[in-house]
Image: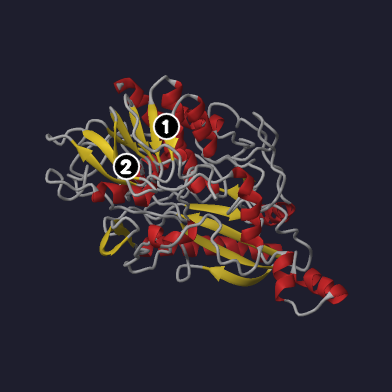
Amino acid sequence: MTTSGESTDRTPSSGVDVCVVGAGPAGAIVAADLSKRGHEVVVLDAGPRFEPSERPERMERHLRPGSAKPVWDVGGERDAYSASGERHYPLNASRVKGVGGSTLHWQGMVMRLHEQDFELDSSVGMGDDWPIDYGDLRPFYAAAEAALNVSGASDNPFEPPREEPHPLPAFPPSYSDSLFAEACESVGVATHSVPNARNSEAVDGQSACVGYGTCKPVCPSGAKYDATRHVDIAEANGARVLDRVPVQRLDHDEAGERVTAAVYATPGGEEHRQEAREFVVAAGGVETPRLLLLSASERYPNGLANSSGAVGRYFMDHLFAGVGGTLDEPTRQKHVGFNTTESHQFYDRPDDSRTAIKLEFLNYAGPAPTDVALEADTFGDALLEEIREAYGTHVAMGALVEQLPSAENRIRLDRSRTDDHGNPVPDVVWRVDDRTRRTIERANEVQREILTELGADVTWTVGPENTGPAYHHMGTTRMGTDPAESVVDRRLRSHDLANLTLAGSSVFVTGGAMNPTLTIAALSLKAAGHIAERL
């Protein structure tokens, strides 16, 4: 069910200043900013609007065993994809097509990239440098934290300099965080709080976090930020947001210097052209390059804005490393659905031998009580005893590990398969290199040392051979100063087309090991300012 029916007017608007493709965090923030400045904005999103009142039902769908229906309706011909790389990439395992985008089901952790992330080649001789540095993005990081109502303690001794404390107070450490704290102190690992884009107290009419614990994939209370907040702001400012209008291609003028229209389809099978003075593509690290490749023309036979050949290339993700087990005492896991303590002690790279590591102390290890009950064949007091024995003694650590950009990792079109509109589906070509494997091994070493000091019985490890992605799609339309090597400039504008801006994680040059959404928000605010200067 959606909030917009078949009778919704999806015809184009006239006199539009900015057409934004995608209503996830990047597109919504750009739309809110530019509409606040008085510009006429239209946002086109491929997916539906999800009714906020349905979130409890979606939570139940997530919790109920054997539910065949995906929480956010992903799958089928519309979301078909290929994964022809060395390692299979399960694209549909963690994406949302709809107004709000990936923030509808993200975990909500928001950190700034480190200063070293922007100058990786200059500092340690690997990866590439960004065309901007931390100082350039610093004021936008502060603005993004305010826009997302970030809760944090500002107590991280390893983070880059900041202007002021986080907007809201931090969430207190979990019980298991206190267990980890003593072990970490014994082995010399410093810990600190985690900034979260969820309300630690009620603000702006929004609920404080009430502890459902199902943050990923759904927050029923709305305390966790999602991009529908900025969609609402944009619409209050006069922007028009259309759902279920997948953009089929972007058209350009005869000279190939400006985009003239976004051609989109409606649920009724009609095709329309939305014209505008400026265009912003903010469809994520997979669908943004896919749209550019689908927009190939005689002037751009290899895809729009792709004179460099870099569109779709340098795809990056974060890899997961983890170690877990049990303790002979209660750990109170599953009481908190998000992380409250981390360590960035191993983040900056000492040399070119490894990439960045962000250590996480997980609050959701082991089975939930419902999981134990569903697998049990007992009832009454016997079932209660089984739950007590199986639940609440688990403990685990995780880590995000950086993957460096490689031209071989890419998003391309699979012309042998098509979506529900007859367009080639995205093909994710992905592998994990040896340096990343070594970094995962190093993360596992630190994790095992801490868990051993804690006295845990280690029962599982996620290491180099069984690692998986964090579903942070980055790098496929990278920033740069050289038009022959990059897709957009330092202002996020295409080198090839004067009125085309790309917003989101696709413009990342390197990915670091931080969850990317705060950087997406900061870059989106920066891009909006540059667009406003041109209007």
In the rendered structure, are the residues bearing label 1 and label 2 in contact, judged by CB atoms less than 8 Å apart? no
**Of the numbered discs in the image, which one, if any, rests on residue 129?**
2
Q: Which residue lies furthest to the bottom in this view?
A: 377
Q: Can residue 355 be seen in this view?
A: yes
Query: Disc 2 marks which amino acid?
Result: Asp
* Residue at 30% from the left image edge and 51% from the top image edge: 290
Disc 1 crowd rating (10 Å Cα; few below 14, some 14-19, many 20+) is many
Q: Cα distance, mark 1 to mark 2? A: 25 Å
Name the residue carrying label 1.
Answer: 30
- Quarter placement of the C terminus: top left
* Residue at 70% from the left image edge and 64% from the top image edge: 368
- Horizontally, residue 8 falls left or right of residue 434, namely right
Disc 2 crowd rating (10 Å Cα; few below 14, some 14-19, many 20+) is many
Q: Is residue 530 above or below residue 514?
A: above
* Residue at 53% from the left image edge and 57% from the top image edge: 399
Q: Residue furthest front?
A: 7
Where in the figure is residue 169, as x and y percent of width and height? 67, 34
- Horizontally, residue 378 falls left or right of residue 77, namely right
Where in the figure is residue 335, as x and y percent of width and height? 73, 54
The answer to which of marks 1 and 2 sits earlier in the sequence is 1
Query: Disc 1 marks which amino acid?
Result: Val
- Horizontally, residue 201 falls left or right of residue 43, namely right
Where in the figure is residue 342, as x and y percent of width and height? 60, 49
Q: Is residue 469 above or below residue 165?
A: below
Task: Count the labels in the image.
Answer: 2
> Is residue 415 or residue 143 the one in the foreground?
415
Where in the figure is residue 331, as x and y percent of width and height? 75, 60
